[in-house]
Image (tube, rainbow, N blue to C red):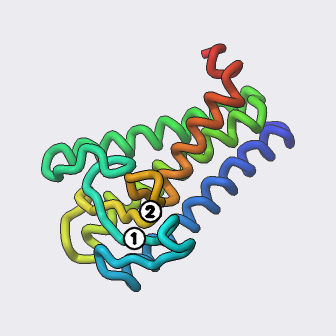
Amino acid sequence: MTKTKRKGLIGSFIIIFLFLLLDQVLKVWVKTHMSIGEEIPLLGSWFKLLFIENDGMAFGLMGNGGLVKTLLSIFRIVAVVALFYLLFRLTKKGTGFGVLFGLSLITAGALGNIIDCVFYGKVFHYAGWLHGRVVDMFSFSFFPPIFNLADAAITVGVFYMILFQWKWLKSL
């Protein structure tokens, strides 16, 4: 692997690591310092931390536990493995950093929510493996869903890819 390609891969891993670290530190802080339903105003009523947990996907979609939760957790794991494989393949091909950046954000967000689902139930003693609840905390007055940094990374990554990497997307 050439030096440029190695830099692209290292840059991708740094992005993933930093977003994942921030996401998990914030989630663990919220989980250990706030009660479910507790609010901390940050910018008046416009933006606040509001601690909730959900069993579903981003923004609380498909949250009903059981078999759906297990399948969703397994899907997330498979998706992240595929994203890492794609990052490696694209790096080897010398794909530009813009594409790697967008995919790194999506990967970091997916991995952040996987950690919640796979481990939090066991770590915080309320469920088994793959049945943890995702910690959400960002609440805006103009946007009803409550979300976390991982959800934001996925959303920003997807919109970034659509808006700024559409030529690459069309080449698929």
Q: Which mark is residue 50?
A: 1
When the figure is inspected, residue 164 is found, relative to residue 167, above or below; the finding is below
- The residue most toward the left is 66
User: Is tag 2's residue or tag 1's residue first in the polypeptide sequence?
Assistant: 1
**Residue type of the residue flagged with mark 1:** Leu
**Residue positioned 53% across, 43% down in the render:** 155
CA gap, disc 2 and disc 1: 6 Å
Q: Horizontal and vertical percent for residue 126?
A: 19, 72
Labels 2 & 1 near each other (Cβ < 8 A): yes
Q: Horizontal and vertical percent for residue 35?
A: 31, 81
Q: Horizontal and vertical percent for residue 78?
A: 39, 39
**Residue positioned 51% across, 65% down in the render:** 46
**Residue type of the residue flagged with mark 2:** Ser
Q: Which mark is residue 139?
A: 2
- State the residue in front, 158 or 144: 144
**Residue positioned 53% across, 52% down in the render:** 152
